[in-house]
Amino acid sequence: MESQSRSAGDVLVPRLVRVTLRRYNPPGRWPDSVPASSGGCVKRDFLVVPDLTKPELIATLDLALRMKRGEYTKRPLEGKTLGMVFAKSSTRTRVSFEVGTFQLGGHALFLSSRDIQLGRGEPIRDTARVLSRYVDGIMIRTFDQAEVEELARFATVPVINGLTDLQHPCQILADLLTVREALGSWDGKVIAWIGDGNNMAHSWLDAAGLLGFEIRVACPEGYQPNADIVARNRARTKVVLTTKPAEAARGAHVINTDVWASMGQEAEQEQRAAAFRGYLVDAALMRQADPGAIFLHCLPAHRGEEVSDEVIEGAQSRVWDEAENRLHVQKALMAVLMGSA
């Protein structure tokens, strides 16, 4: 999750997360649409999971799996550069995008908001226009979803959302690939989310709405996911909201969680620890799930808080496959958006 609250914006939801529900990219050809950076007229962004159609998402995971197996040897980013804008520090996001760009023949440029004019008040729209003259794609990891949307609106190269307080779509692609590898498919499966109704919960809800699987979200009162995102996806698939972790976990095929207090929420640590008491994913909760269930966590994990050491290190954990899959799904995204996959 690694979220941090910001001041008031368009709509206030619990934890003062600013929400702008954007109009999604229209369906296009995938993966052979022409990227704007190569001189074509089509520019696609990936800011939220439904920026892809269902066939496009499946095709992206197919390509990621080919890459993971070593069956894809093209270098579609040869001579191209990815600008990586970080307003929030990271391990997995930076390393996976940087390594992935290199493996596809390109170069990744790390841009901390502290080191560029964006951190000194330059408007996002100006940064978008300038970077578009230098690089072939932009990945941004920041606070407000509205900032990512503005960047995408003014950039003439593809923009990828590396994380915001509202959404974490790249992580969900990695999770979906992990589910597919471990369970064969998400069809007919139940995904359970235990804990904070945060950016990960929102992106899981969007994935459920797009792909049609059942999702159950167990959160304490006051920490539920954004109501608009819930309503949008309830119109497309079965969404269960509960305050009881066991109810969400019962018979589920995937048990998911995240940290209770993330970067920027240190002052809430004691309050959150009290609110989330009983939301630990331990062996007892895993026994409520389907016998073949897997456990996922986007990391970093706080053992003994949201997950027990026994579970994250146990036979049902797929956390390390999940972390590796960030590399493969993001390579597939970049190959499609910035290259000619």
Image (tube, rainbow, N blue to C red):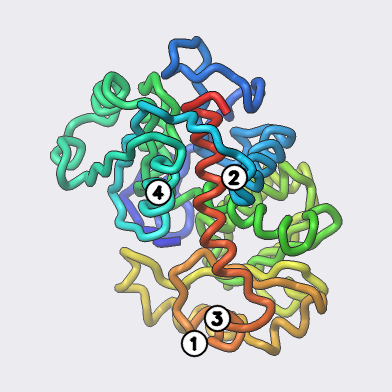
User: Is 282 on the left-hand or right-hand side of 40?
Assistant: right
Q: Residue visible at 41% across and 35% down?
A: 105
**Residue under pointer 1:** 304
Q: Residue visible at 80% across and 74% down?
A: 292
Image location of residue 51, percent across then percent down: 59, 33
Q: Whole-Å distance between the Cαs marked 2 and 1?
A: 35 Å
Image location of residue 224, percent across then percent down: 58, 62
User: Is 14 on the left-hand or right-hand side of 312?
Assistant: left
Q: Residue visible at 44% across and 76% down?
A: 272
Q: Whole-Å distance between the Cαs marked 3 and 4?
A: 29 Å
**Residue under pointer 4:** 99
The mark closer to the camera, 2 or 1, is 2
Residue 67: give its label. 2
Q: Tell me whether circle 3 and circle 4 mark residues in contact (CB < 8 Å).
A: no
Image position of 231 with respect to 129: above or below: below
**Residue closer to the observer: 23 or 316:** 316
Image location of residue 131, percent across then percent down: 27, 26
Q: Tell me whether circle 2 and circle 1 mark residues in contact (CB < 8 Å).
A: no
Q: Secondary structure at mark 3?
A: loop
Q: Whole-Å distance between the Cαs marked 3 and 1?
A: 6 Å
* For marks 3 and 4 on the same chain, the one whose residue lies earlier in the sequence: 4
**Residue under pointer 3:** 307
Residue type, label 1: Gly
Total marks in image: 4
* For marks 3 and 2 on the same chain, the one whose residue lies earlier in the sequence: 2
The quarter of the picture where the C terminus appears is top right
**Residue closer to the observer: 241 or 287:** 287
User: Is 27 on the left-hand or right-hand side of 82?
Assistant: right
* For marks 2 and 4 on the same chain, the one whose residue lies earlier in the sequence: 2
* For marks 4 and 1 on the same chain, the one whose residue lies earlier in the sequence: 4
